[in-house]
C-alpha cells in the first residue's frame, strides 16, 4: 500500500457486487480488502485496520449490525452500510450501532464511490482542532471528540459528532435540511434529506429529545439546554 493511500474494507456476500465495488474503489486510488461473511469481516477489520468499511446488512454467520457493533467496540471506524430494504427501523438500528451513512440496494457504484470519498473527507475535516463548545449542560470537545450532557458522556459516530457540532456552532439558528446535507454529507440531492432526519433521531435518542428543535418544512435548530 502506498504511503497516504486509504484502505477500505468491503463486506458483501454477493461476489459480483463485492467485486464491482472493489474495482471501482481501486480505480479511485483506494486499497481494498474483501470479506464475505460476518465473522471474517470482524477478523479482517482487526487485521487490516481499514480507514472505512462498506458493510452489507444481510450477511452469513451474523449480520452487518453485529459486525458493526464488534468492529466499533474494538476501534472506531467510519461505516457505510448497504441494505436491500428501505426500512427505517433497520436504518436507525444501523446508526445506533455506529454506521455513519447508508445506501439502499440497488445503488450506483459511482454514487457509492462518491459517498466513500465524502465520508472520508468529512472525517478528516472533523479531526481538525477547535475550541470546546459549551452550551448549558452540553459540552462538545472537538480535540478529544467527546460529547457530554449533564456530565454524562454520549458515544456518537463521526457523522453524528459533525452534525451536532455544526448545529451547535449556530445555536438557536434554523439550518435547512438541504444545507445540512450539503455541508455535512457533501451531497446536493434534495431527495436524500431523510439521511439528515435519521441522524437527528439518533442524536435525540442519545442526547435527549429536547436538544434539537424541528422547524417543519425548513430544518433543525439546536436549542441551548439549561
Image: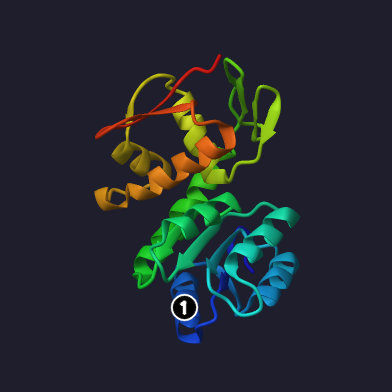
Q: Residue furthest bottom?
A: 16
Answer with the quarter of the image where residue 50 lies: bottom right
**Label 1: how many residues lie within 10 Å, few (<14), some (14-19) or many (20+)?**
some
Q: Is residue 215 visible?
A: yes
Quadrant where the C terminus sits is top right
Answer with the quarter of the image where residue 70 lies: bottom right
Provide residue 198's location: percent of width, then percent of height.
43, 47
Answer with the quarter of the image where residue 170 lies: top left
Residue at x-position 60% and y-position 41%: 156
Which structural element holds mark 1?
helix
Q: Is residue 101 above or below residue 163?
A: below
Its colouring scheme is rainbow
Q: Is residue 8 visible?
A: no
Q: Which is nearer the eye, 210 or 134?
A: 210
Q: Which is nearer the eye, 33 or 65?
A: 65
Residue at x-position 51% and y-position 44%: 159
Provide residue 150's location: percent of width, then percent of height.
66, 22
Q: Is residue 55 above or below residue 205?
A: below
Residue at x-position 75% and y-position 69%: 47
Provide residue 222's location: percent of width, then percent of height.
44, 25
Residue at x-position 70% and y-position 69%: 42
Provide residue 209's location: percent of width, then percent of height.
50, 31
Give the side of residue 20 with respect to residue 177, left or right.
right
Give the total of numbered labels. Answer: 1
Q: Which is nearer the eye, 129 or 53?
A: 53
Which residue is identified by label 1?
Answer: 23
Quadrant where the N terminus sits is bottom right
Q: Is residue 64 above or below residue 19?
A: above
Amino acid at each position: 500500500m502506498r504511503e497516504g493511500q486509504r484502505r477500505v474494507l468491503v463486506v458483501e456476500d454477493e461476489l459480483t457486487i463485492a467485486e464491482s465495488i472493489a474495482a471501482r474503489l481501486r480505480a479511485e486510488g483506494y486499497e481494498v480488502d474483501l470479506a464475505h461473511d460476518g465473522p471474517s469481516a470482524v477478523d479482517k477489520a482487526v487485521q487490516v485496520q481499514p480507514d472505512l468499511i462498506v458493510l452489507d446488512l444481510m450477511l452469513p454467520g451474523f449480520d452487518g449490525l453485529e459486525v458493526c457493533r464488534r468492529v466499533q467496540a474494538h476501534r472506531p471506524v467510519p461505516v457505510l452500510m448497504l441494505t436491500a430494504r428501505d426500512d427505517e427501523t433497520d436504518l436507525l438500528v444501523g446508526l445506533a450501532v455506529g454506521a455513519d451513512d447508508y445506501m439502499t440496494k440497488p445503488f450506483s457504484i459511482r454514487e457509492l464511490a462518491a459517498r466513500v470519498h465524502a465520508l472520508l473527507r468529512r472525517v478528516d475535516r472533523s479531526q481538525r482542532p477547535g475550541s470546546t463548545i459549551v452550551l448549558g449542560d452540553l459540552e462538545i470537545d472537538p480535540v478529544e471528540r467527546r460529547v457530554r450532557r449533564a456530565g454524562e458522556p454520549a458515544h456518537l459516530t463521526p457523522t453524528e459528532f459533525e452534525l451536532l457540532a455544526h448545529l451547535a456552532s449556530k445555536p438557536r439558528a434554523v439550518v435547512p435540511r438541504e444545507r445540512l446535507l450539503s455541508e455535512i454529507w457533501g451531497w446536493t440531492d434534495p431527495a436524500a434529506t431523510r439521511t439528515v432526519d435519521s441522524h437527528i433521531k439518533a442524536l435525540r435518542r442519545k442526547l435527549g429529545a429536547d436538544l434539537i428543535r424541528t422547524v417543519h418544512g425548513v430544518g433543525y435548530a439546536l436549542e441551548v439546554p439549561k
